[in-house]
Amino acid sequence: MAEAFTGAAARRRGLDVEVGSAGILPGARPIPKETLAAIGGGGLDMRGHVSRPLSADLLGGADMVIGMAREHVREAVFLDEACWPKAFTLREIVRRGTLAGPRPAGQPLASWLALIHSGRPRQTLLADDPEDDIADPAGEGRRRVRAAAKEIRALTDRLLELVYP
């Protein structure tokens, strides 16, 4: 969902950014029907999308790594320790970015991420946190999937406002 919503929001804003997704489950899985319906409700068609597993190669080439939950960030940092300063949960990066303020024009993304990363203890990765984690709604029914989609869409829109004001 986050890939679809972020990509669509970036296109609406005229941004030339590459958005991709990967997960901690085995790859080559189609998107569940409930999730397709929630994404499609936003006018997006992801029927041909299949999952791919997270890898150190993907992480090394990413400017920013966003997980839905700490377990995703934890796995990313395990695979590529160097991604820690640029890896956040979606809720966390929006919260910390809002506190720091939008990225000023001309400031490199890595510098802005370093600012919002400042003071983050690595120990936060050891436990899940309901304030930072968006629980996977798969198998929890349409209402829960739609609620997650609504939240993820709002957060990805806000993230783009912060990164590309």
Image: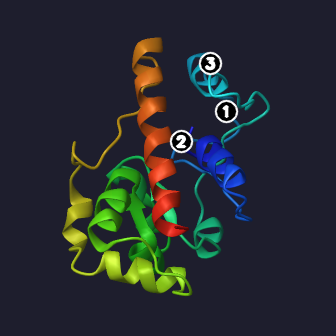
Q: Quadrant of residue 140?
A: top left
| Mark 2 or 3: the one toward you | 3
Would you place residue 47 above or below residue 88 in this image?
above
| Mark 1 or 3: the one toward you | 3
Q: Secondary structure at mark 1?
A: loop
The Cα–Cα distance between marks 1 and 3, rounded to whole angstroms, is 16 Å
x, y percent for residue 128: 24, 48
User: What residue is disc 2 on?
Assistant: 25
Question: Which one is in front, 91 or 60?
Answer: 91
User: What residue is disc 1 on?
Assistant: 29
Asked whether disc 1 touches disc 2, contact meaning CB atoms under 8 Å apart, the reply is yes
- Three-letter code for the amino acid on which mark 1 is drawn: Arg
The Cα–Cα distance between marks 1 and 2, rounded to whole angstroms, is 9 Å
At x 43%, y 80%, the residue is 112
User: What residue is disc 3 on?
Assistant: 37
- Three-letter code for the amino acid on which mark 3 is drawn: Ala
